[in-house]
């Protein structure tokens, strides 16, 4: 039953054609993560997982490594421990309250830990927890081997040389919890119909998604698969191609989590 997606279906013929899906917080709620990955594997669509290095158990790491080899998923780094270090204001693991040296230590050990757990190098992309970090943080990334950063489309680009911006444009859980399928369809339509040619980034949080969310997600994946005009891409591919042509973020804001 995909009638709820009719507004999106219409926009797909004329709107921005490329989509990617970023699921955050791998390491939390492995059972829910497995269900989400199943939805993508069944649809034949690759999903980008933002994994919390300190939270990924060895068993999950091995499984994710197998799925990377299979081509079903791509895994990149989501901070270090998803810990809030700010004493006031908005939550952040890589905020102004921490010196660059402490941030660099956490990013580097997260990269090492994730490579060990997966048995291979993760994609060279950094998604900061809660979708936010400082410009100092972004500047630390290229020397540590990262080529791309993913935050909210409403955030100003970091402007760091050698670092591609791959913003997310839509917060699935927020849209779905506020407006159900109708609310989600409105947000998806808005993202699909927005001007510009930047890929539409759908941010997911498997640990906060119930069976209804997953059913709606399956509907959307199946719609995008059947529309020849839609191209399902992934962040790794965008990072590669955008190292030649920078993406200009567009679209409306998605809440950080
Ligand atoms: Zn997160």
Image: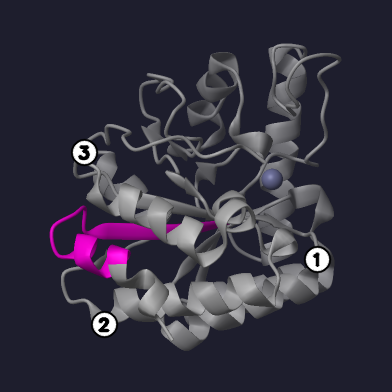
The C terminus lies in quadrant: top right
Distance between the alpha carbons at the discs numbered 3 and 1? 37 Å
Secondary structure under the numbered disc 3 in the rendered image: loop
Residue furthest left as drawn: 14
Q: Is mark 2 within 8 Å of ligand 1?
A: no
Q: Is residue 172 left or right of residue 239?
A: right
Q: Which mark is residue 226?
A: 2
Q: Position of residue 39 (x, y in %)?
A: 55, 81
Comparing labels 3 and 2, the label whose residue is closer to the camera = 2
Q: Earlier in the sequence, mark 2 or mark 1?
A: 1
Q: Is residue 121 left or right of residue 226?
A: right
Q: Is 53 located above or below residue 126 in the figure?
A: below
Distance between the alpha carbons at the discs numbered 2 and 1? 31 Å
What is the magenta range?
A: 7-23
Q: Which mark is residue 29?
A: 1
* Residue drawn at the location 84% of the way across and 64% of the way down: 57
Q: Earlier in the sequence, mark 3 or mark 1?
A: 1
Q: Position of residue 247 (x, y in %)?
A: 27, 36
Comparing labels 3 and 1, the label whose residue is closer to the camera = 1
Name the residue beneath numbered marker 3.
244
Q: Nearer the viewer, residue 65 or 257?
A: 257
Q: Can I make out residue 60 in this image?
A: yes
Secondary structure under the numbered disc 1 in the rendered image: loop
The N terminus lies in quadrant: bottom left
Q: Is mark 3 within 8 Å of ligand 1?
A: no
- Structural crowding at the residue carrying mark 1, measured as other residues with C-alpha within 10 Å and reported as few (<14), some (14–19) or many (≥20): few
Q: Is residue 196 left or right of residue 72?
A: left
- Structural crowding at the residue carrying mark 3, measured as other residues with C-alpha within 10 Å and reported as few (<14), some (14–19) or many (≥20): few
Q: Could you tell me if the residues under marks 3 and 2 are in contact, i.e. CB atoms within 8 Å? A: no
- Structural crowding at the residue carrying mark 2, measured as other residues with C-alpha within 10 Å and reported as few (<14), some (14–19) or many (≥20): few
Q: Earlier in the sequence, mark 3 or mark 2?
A: 2
């Amino acid at each position: 039953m995909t009638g709820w997606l009719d507004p999106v279906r219409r926009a797909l013929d004329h709107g921005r054609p490329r989509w990617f899906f970023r699921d955050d917080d791998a390491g939390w709620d492995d059972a829910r993560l497995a269900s989400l990955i199943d939805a993508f594997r069944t649809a034949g669509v690759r999903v980008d997982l933002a994994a919390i290095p300190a939270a990924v158990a060895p068993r999950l790491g091995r499984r994710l490594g197998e799925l990377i080899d299979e081509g079903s998923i791509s895994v990149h780094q989501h901070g270090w421990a998803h810990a809030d270090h700010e004493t006031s204001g908005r939550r952040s693991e890589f905020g102004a309250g921490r010196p660059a040296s402490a941030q660099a230590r956490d990013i580097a050990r997260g990269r090492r830990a994730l490579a060990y757990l997966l048995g291979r190098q993760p994609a060279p992309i950094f998604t900061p927890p809660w979708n936010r970090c400082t410009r100092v943080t972004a500047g630390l990334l290229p020397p540590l081997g990262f080529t791309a950063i993913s935050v909210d489309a409403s955030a100003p680009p970091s402007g760091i040389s050698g670092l591609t911006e791959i913003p997310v444009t839509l917060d699935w859980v927020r849209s779905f919890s506020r407006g159900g399928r109708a609310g989600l369809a409105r947000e998806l339509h808005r993202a699909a119909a927005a001007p510009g040619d930047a890929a539409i980034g759908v941010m997911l949080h498997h640990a906060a998604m119930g069976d209804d969310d997953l059913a709606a997600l399956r509907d959307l994946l199946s719609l995008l698969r059947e529309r020849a005009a839609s191209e399902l891409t992934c962040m790794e591919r965008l990072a590669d191609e955008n190292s030649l042509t920078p993406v200009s973020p567009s679209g409306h804001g998605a809440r950080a989590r």
